[in-house]
Each structure stands twice: as C-alpha cells, then as structure tokens.
Image (cartoon, helix red, strand yellow):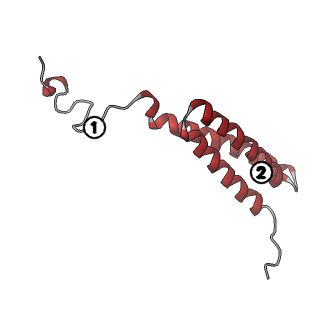
Amino acid sequence: MMTENEINPAGGNKPAGQKPVKDGDKPVANYKILGGNLLVFALYTITALSTGTDGGVGALAIAAFQFVICTILAIVYKRSVWFLSAVLVLIIGFGTCVSTFSLGDMR
C-alpha cells in the first residue's frame, strides 16, 4: 500500500489540503458562460444603439429576451451561473436603456 506522499509527492499537481475539482464545478466553464452572454449582449447593444433614436429600447427588449432564455437554461441545466449572468445582462441592459435617454428636469 502506498502512502499519500508516494501518491502525491511534494511539488505534485495537488497542493496539500485542496479538494478535487468536480467536472461541473470548473470555474473556467462558468467564466465562458458569463463571457459569452456578455459578448452577445455587447454585440446586439452596439448594433441597436448605432441604428438610431430608439436603439436603447430595442436593446432592452433583446436583453429581456436573453434574460428569459438564460433563466430557462438555468432551470434545464441546474446551474446558477446561467441565472446570475441573466440578471447581470438585465441590469446592464436597463442601465444602457436609461443612459440613452435624458431624464429631464428632476425637480
């Protein structure tokens, strides 16, 4: 029978005390989901804002649609990163919509 030092010698890939990473918990996959959603959001927002006056409203409508799709994917895949990225896209989309319009005199 081999000891733990023989299985994982000093300088090995697994630092002492670190738990093994499950396939579904890889942070790189989470960053890819979030980054992909933000990239899609940026592309259609830039396109919508470059078309003219009501681009902010159109971008918010598409962001709401993306929110619904990501929420459905969060339920189907049972991954919270889909829902968190959906909320982030919706918040940024709302901010983009508000920033494209003048709020007028706030007295």
Horizontal arrangement in the rendering, residue 85 relative to residue 102 (left or right) = left
Instruction: Using the image as rendered, state which of residue 36 and residue 107 is in the foreground.
Output: 107
Q: Residue furthest top?
A: 1
Q: Measuring from the top left, give residue 30's x and y in whole percent.
A: 51, 38
Depicted 56 relative to depicted 103: above or below: above
Residue type at mark 2 is: Leu
Q: Residue at x 81, y 64 (%)?
A: 101
Q: Which mark is residue 18?
A: 1
Do residues under tags 1 and 2 come within 8 Å of each other at their CB atoms? Answer: no
Q: Measuring from the top left, give residue 66's x and y in whole percent.
A: 71, 41
Q: Quadrant of residue 65?
A: top right
The residue to which callout 2 is attached is 60
Q: Quadrant of residue 81?
A: top right
Depicted 68 relative to depicted 95: above or below: above
Depicted 67 relative to depicted 21: above or below: below
Depicted 55 relative to depicted 67: above or below: below
Q: Residue furthest right?
A: 53
Badge 1: how crowded within 10 Å, few (<14), some, or many (20+)? Answer: few
Specify the quadrant that holds the C terminus. bottom right
Q: Which mark is residue 8?
A: none
Q: Earlier in the sequence, mark 1 or mark 2?
A: 1
Horizontal arrangement in the rendering, residue 99 relative to residue 15 (left or right) = right
Label 1, label 2: how far apart the Cα atoms are: 43 Å
Instruction: Using the image as rendered, state which of residue 35 and residue 63 is in the foreground.
Output: 63
Q: Residue at x 22, y 30 (%)?
A: 12
Residue type at mark 1 is: Gln
Specify the quadrant that holds the N terminus. top left
Horizontal arrangement in the rendering, residue 99 relative to residue 2 (left or right) = right
Instruction: Using the image as rendered, state which of residue 39 and residue 63 is in the foreground.
Output: 63
Q: Measuring from the top left, give residue 28's x and y in whole percent.
A: 47, 36
Instruction: Label 1: state its secondary structure.
Output: loop
Q: Measuring from the top left, give residue 7's x and y in whole percent.
A: 18, 23
